[in-house]
Amino acid sequence: MSEALASPADRPFVPVHARGERLEPAFHYACAAAATALFGAMIGLCIMLAWGGWPSISTFGIGFFTSTVWNPVTDIYGGASPILGTLITSAIALALALPLAFCTAVFLVEFCPNPLRRPIGIAVELLAGIPSIVYGMWGLFVFAPLFAQYIETPLMSWAPPGSIWERLFTGIPNGSGILTASIILAIMILPYIAATLRELFLSIPVRVRESAYGIGCTPLEVVWSVTLPYVRRSAIGAVMLGLGRALGETMAVTFVIGNSHRLPRGLFDSGSTISSIIANEFAEATSPMHMSALLELGFVLFLITFVVLALARALLGHGHSA
Amino acid sequence: MPASAEVQTPPLDEQPPPQQFVEPVPQDEVKVSIRNLNFFYGQTHALLDVSMGIPNKAVTAIVGPSGCGKSTLLRVLNRIYGLYPGQRAEGEVLLDGQNILDRKVHLPWLRSRVGMVFQQSTPFPMSTFDNVAFGVRLYENLRKPELAARVEESLRSAALWEEVKDKLDRSALSLSGGQQQRLCVARSMAVRPEVLLLDEPASALDPISTAKLEDTIVSLKREVAIVIVTHNLQQAARVSDRTAFMFLGRLIEYGTTERVFNNPRTARAADYVTGRFG
């Protein structure tokens, strides 16, 4: 044996990684603590909302969900209108945003000429980063007047009396209302969904796309039959991310929804969502019952989000695994 | 030492080996005729003036060291390179006399006639049955029993039927690697192509799966023209009727497999098949 290679016995036992190994337990506990704190915060939030909302829950019971009376003077509160408003605006927003986001992502991955790929991709990501209050202002000052003039008024005068269209287009053509809020929401969640879908499509192995093309698929067939099933699970996650944002979005909606406590009669009518009500009234909720009703609304929003996520998981569980 | 000092006049009876030796394929056997094909990845000139005929109902192997352009040549034959901007081919590739490099060629139509199987298996995320039926459904409106018959026929031709006939509804991703690769062959064959391109189809497989795949290839040549790119010279010798040797983007030697392996005419091909380099 050459002298350069000292035998193991000659080498003093000093572990090279000693410092790193000392840090190991600390790292372990730091990770555990961070995750546990998150879980604890969620539980705490849930308990706080239920606790704070308890006077309202015990007083109004199930009637809170069916009544549309919201009267701080008589201290009687029913949340049907904002709860319904939240569900409707989010559903419409998702219905509008999903096809557009899907097409955007497909365009960026399959069709986009190389020089345009980066600019459009960056634009999509920037759009996702714009603060919601900016969307709100834009919606109120720019979008709403145009929407009232060019969409709402013509549609309302077109709708034949007595038809389903007339009922759908009921409201005041001032640009604020359920549909305006939904459209603004759609614009806000679109980049989220599009950016996530694009990342997902890009994560598909090149050979899978090539073999789909290689068997003679058109781009639409490749996307629909191969790449979309390939990322199905994560794609639903992307959609849920968008839906979650739509459900909880506050400022932009508060700007353009009209903030009325009545049940909206049509798409152009003003309404409210849970978060817009809370944002509008928290500062002026002087009676304990008023505050409690707002907290109960918050609790309901929490539950809705939870149910949406649970539903998504259940849906995923049933399909064949990809 | 300057290069000129090395030049020696060879004896008259011993001509230097040619730089290129390409045996023509008889005209009535040619399925695909490649003429003066040049290929570019952006500025990189990857194929230089490749001309060769690919015979029908036979196996043609393309061999050569890494980066010689053999996969590139294969990817021209179904124009899969067209997915990537910046890649372009010049020259002519005639499939039954029709130039497939023509802009007007309908790509799905071309790819239904020229199928391709890749190095790594690429089952789609669906059942085994749906994988094989996938391509068929794109082109033909078969009724259920006919479709089932086609799927069985294709799986049989890929020597996979006996192994999967009881689990056609299960996800194709649950098959073993070798089965997945033969599934991809079956999927391509289900469309009834005329040419089948295989891009190192066995390089990710174990020896037993490789042997099964090679048997499949040999039996498939009754139906289609097969072009196989391989790193494995023994494999080329076992399955192919003709062998093309490529080097640095050029076709150096092309002829019957037996002749190319036993009696190579070019120095480079001789070095390669005897294992002196590559």
Image (spheres, coloured by chain):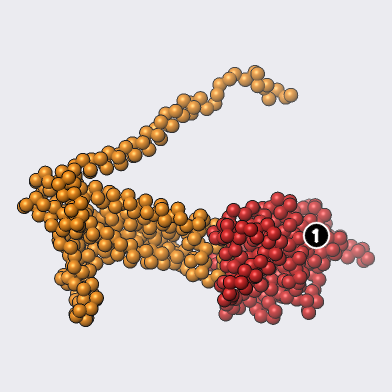
Chain colours: A orange, B red
- Relative to A271, say whether A292 is above or below: above
Question: Is label 1 in a helix, a strand or a loop?
Answer: helix
Disc 1 residue type (three-letter): Ala
Q: Looking at the image, can residue B230 be seen?
A: no
Quadrant for the N terminus of chain A, please: top right
Residue B79 in percent (x, y) is at: 61, 70
Indicate left or right for B106 with A246 as reference.
right
Q: Which residue is mark 1?
A: B237
From the viewer's perspective, is A131 left or right of B190? Answer: left
**Label 1 crowd bin: few (<14), some (14–19), many (20+), radius 10 Å:** some
At a point 67% along the width and 75% down the height, the residue shown is: B93
Residue positioned 11% across, 44% down in the render? A288
Q: Among all residues in the image, which is located at the extreme left?
A: A73
What residue is shown at x 44% (from left), y 59% (from top)? A198
Residue B57 appears in the figure: yes
The location of residue A71, given as percent across then percent down, is: 9, 54
- In which image quadrant can residue B168 be found? bottom right
Identify the residue at image location x=78%, y=76%. Answer: B29
Q: Chain of mark 1?
A: B
